[in-house]
Image (cartoon, rainbow, N blue to C red):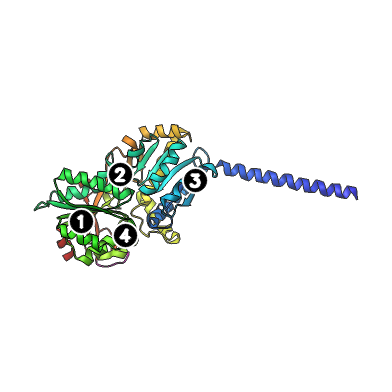
Amino acid sequence: MSKILQAVSVRHATWWIVAVLLLATAQAKADENIKIGFGMALTGPLAANGKMSLVAMQIWENDINAKGGLLGRPVKLVYYDDQSSPAQVPSIYAKLLDIDKVDLIVSGYASTQIAAAMPVAIQRKKLFISLFGTGINETFNYPKYFSMIPNGPTPKPAFTRGFFKVAEVQTPRPQTIALAHADAEFGQNACEGARENAKTSGFKVVYDRSYPPTTTDFSPIVRAIQAANPDLLVICSYPLDTVGMVRAMKEVDFKPKMWGGAMVGLQATVFKQQLGPLLNGLVNNDTWLPVKSMEFPGAMELLKKYQERAKAAGTDPLGYYMPVWAYAYLQVLGDAITASKSLNDDVLADYIRKTRFATVVGDVKFGKQGEWEEERTLAAQFQNITGNSIDDFRELKTEVIIYPPKYKSGEVIYPYEKAIAK
């Protein structure tokens, strides 16, 4: 009997040893991954752009792992939904670094989220590449920060520079302008830049006010602007207030000579379809569109992969806005890791600072405060939209680049009243 018990005990011990070895092997395998952590707006008002960014990042993850990973190790993205709430961001990055033990961090989408993550990145002395942040490092001046957005060395004015450049050459030349912005990180920064552009262009500001981000009725705001009778109107807004402003302009029947500016949301198909012909004549900032002049190496291949996945992912079916940028900022990180053969934040930051990168959004070189060395923000105008279907926006006849000249795909229709009469 004792021999039987001894045999059972040995068998149990053997199984226990095997289980421990298997667990250790699995853990070792997990530790082989190079883990890149981030928060992303997957729900809430920023989700339309956050979700399409994530799909592109997952395509990069698949692409890089199909090539053998980085430094001979597979790459794993570790992420959490920040719910479009800056308040969620610091704890997400603390969890990524302290519990998930990620090797590197990158930002989620949008200025408010990036600004909320910066203190964590700085405290932990981490490299931090951001996705579409406006002038974030002017406050922090952090040497390991790099911004994936084509706003160049003066990021705040860049958002509306194209609008002003187009407006100032019209005949007769407009004289006055109104400015309205959401009282939040992006709205404040972009409108600060718009004031600078108005001064440079010589336009008299006749209205300049903010509104709470929680505003739902924009008609009183538009009526107040209309009473000031400006020739031009620049709005700096986030997606939901962008939609509200466009609808209010129609409701009040306000027709300045040109309007738009820096209205986030109009780059996403879901909002374009919601608004349809209401967009005609509006001149807004953009960053990339799949026109011939912007078919940088790999961009159209990425777009095809994205569109194949979009439906299953429940995200923007066209992907003309964020995907190329989300892919590109991971391209920069991946290329830096490969070239420097390091995961050290200081080594990577030093390499990124002095290197020009070939990406799906063209060549990228970072300059002062981690912004792009050269500005390449676009101004585009919606024209001749007749309906609200996706086909109204698939072909870019209804959205043309009007600035800068290097990337132009059409001519501006001016004044606004002429654009909506078509």
Whether residue 243 is situated above or below residue 202 in the rendered picture: below
* Distance CA(mark 1)–CA(mark 2): 22 Å
Mark 4 Cα within 10 Å, few/some/many (few <14, many 20+)?
A: few
Q: Earlier in the sequence, mark 1 or mark 3?
A: 3
For residue 353, what is the image quadrant? Answer: top left
Given contact means CB atoms under 8 Å apart, are the residues at marks 1 and 4 in contact? no
Check disc 3 and give the amino acid type. Asn
Horizontal side of residue 203 vs 30, given as left or right: left
- Residue 93 visible from this viewpoint: yes
Tag in front: 2 or 3: 2
Q: Earlier in the sequence, mark 1 or mark 2?
A: 2
Q: Position of residue 371 (x, y in %)?
A: 32, 39
Q: CB atoms at circles 1 and 2 under 8 Å apart?
A: no
Residue 215 tag number: 4
- Give the residue number, with chain letter if any, for mark 3: 65
In x, y percent, where is residue 179?
A: 22, 52
Quadrant of the image for the C terminus?
bottom left
